Amino acid sequence: MLKHRGFPSRLTGTDFQFTIRRANVKEGATKIIRRERFKDRKGPDRAADTAFMAALWNYFGEEVFERGNLDAGRLSWLFGRELVAAEDPFDPASYDALLKIDRKRAEVSFPEVFAPEAAPYVWDDEDEDE
């Protein structure tokens, strides 16, 4: 499993994780699914989505990237909309799966991340991998 060094491990001050520490050797990678985001989601949940998208954008940009140690649950909130499969066939239960940000959809969903005057997120990540 590829570890994305320097990628924030969680949203500061919360329990919303962005990465996992180690691969699940026994059962394999958790499957990425498309989770429905309803309009009545709580503010912290929406903030976690925004921060995760900002982290993805700052780290990968428009490049294709390997899933690696990115959290399947957090990826699933964006998958099928702002985050799309970059290979065919796509294996949603593989740490080697390739993904890509769909910039047009992401800009519509998270304008504050892509606005020219948007300040870059500053990560105070105390859980940096060893």
Image: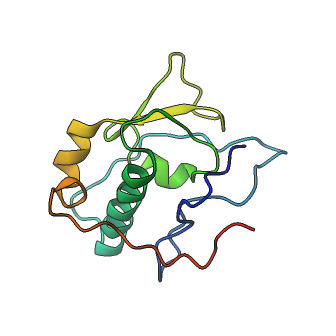
Name the residue rendered at 50%, 69% in the picture.
16
Quadrant where the N terminus lies? top right
Q: Based on the displayed image, in which of its 4 quarters is residue 30 positioned? A: top right
The foreground one among 5 and 73 is 5
Q: Residue at x 57, y 61 (%)?
A: 6
For the residue pair 103 and 109, the one nearer the viewer reads as: 103
Q: Position of residue 95 (x, y in %)?
A: 66, 38
Number of marks in picture: 0
* Quarter in which the C terminus is drawn: bottom right
Q: What residue is at 59 percent from the left and 32 percent from the top?
A: 97
- Give 15 or 38, whichever is nearer the viewer: 15
Residue farthest bottom in this picture: 13
7 over 94 or under it: above or below: below
For the point 65% across and 33% down, the residue is: 96
The coloring applied to the image is: rainbow
Residue 86 relative to residue 95: left or right: left
Q: Could you tell me residue 66's position as x and y percent?
A: 57, 37
Left or right, residue 28 beside residue 87: right
**In this rendering, would 32 be left or right of 38?**
right
Residue positioned most to the top:
88
Residue 91: x percent and y percent? 59, 27
- Where residue 65 appears, as percent x and y from the top left, is 51, 37
Indicate the quadrant where residue 79 lies. top left
